[in-house]
């Protein structure tokens, strides 16, 4: 008796259960992040489709999907004027001084990987400086060599010189910001790093991916 296959497509052009490989292939071919698998019975296929694909995809499938993501990033990097596989940081400040916060995102996915603040009576340059150092410390902890982009020339220079050259005066309200500055400067003095720090060229590439979008 000929063995019959049913094909479950969890993620593709049209998720569902298909009777032939040809129908399944049309739903997943060249589709980023496609998830699919064959089953020996319709009952097993129905149960699988109602569940999570991770419960049915083996390690080889997960490795293949991870490699697909790596290749996608590499392909995008080859077409892009900047390094796609990178971290971007930015700060936002409501007033000068004003409520300040900063964050970092993973450029390929725009996923936020850290966000700190807001703190009262800060400045944008301070936030940019703290964001870069935060990114450096995080990447070193994770043993990652991803580059960091910032659109602040001042902050990049401050990090290079290991000193936050702000003219802002410390007071009771903004004291937590100055505590963070002291921690950041101490980290720069006591740590080395190989992470490339790069200037984001806003005029050429548009707003930095970590931008808060409040302009």
Image (tube, rainbow, N blue to C red):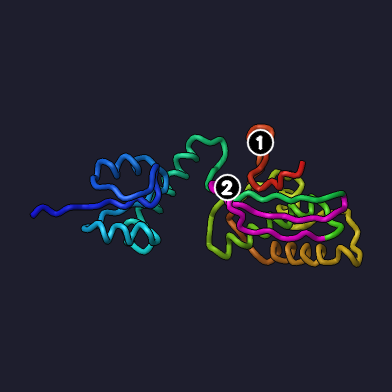
In the image, residue 207 lies at what x, y percent?
67, 39
Taken as a whole, is the magenta stretch helix, strand or loop?
A: strand
Image quadrant where residue 134 sits: bottom right
Cβ atoms under marks 2 and 1 closer than 8 Å: no
Q: Is residue 199 above or below residue 137?
A: above
Which residue does the numbered mark 2 point to in the structure image? 107
Write the start and end of the magenta stretch as one range: 96-119
Q: Quadrant of the N terminus?
A: bottom left
Disc 1 element: loop
In the image, residue 51 lies at what x, y percent?
38, 61
Locate residue 203 relative to residue 27 in the image: left or right.
Answer: right
Q: CA distance from mark 2 to mark 1?
A: 13 Å
In the image, residue 67 lies at what x, y percent?
39, 51
- From the viewer's side, name the closer residue of 82 and 207: 207
Residue 57 visible, this orientation: no
Residue 206, numbered label: 1
């Amino acid at each position: 008796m000929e063995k019959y296959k049913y094909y479950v497509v969890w993620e593709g052009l049209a998720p569902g259960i298909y009777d032939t490989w040809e129908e399944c292939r049309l739903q997943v071919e060249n589709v980023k992040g496609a998830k699919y698998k064959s089953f020996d019975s319709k009952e097993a296929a129905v149960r699988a489709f109602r569940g999570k694909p991770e419960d049915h995809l083996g390690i080889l499938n997960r490795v293949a999907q991870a490699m697909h993501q790596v290749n996608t990033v590499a392909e995008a990097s080859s077409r892009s004027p900047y390094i796609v596989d990178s971290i971007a940081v930015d700060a936002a400040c409501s007033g000068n001084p004003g409520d300040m916060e900063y964050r970092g995102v993973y450029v390929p996915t725009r996923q936020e990987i850290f966000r700190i603040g807001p703190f009262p009576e800060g400045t944008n340059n301070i936030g940019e400086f703290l964001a870069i150092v935060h990114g450096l410390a995080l990447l070193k902890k994770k043993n990652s060599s991803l580059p960091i982009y910032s659109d602040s020339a001042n902050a990049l220079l401050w990090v290079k010189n290991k000193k936050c050259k702000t003219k802002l005066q410390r007071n009771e309200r903004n004291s937590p910001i100055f505590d963070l500055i002291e921690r950041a400067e101490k980290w720069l003095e006591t740590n080395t790093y190989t992470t490339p720090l790069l200037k984001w060229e806003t005029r050429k590439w548009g707003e930095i991916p970590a931008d808060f979008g409040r302009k």
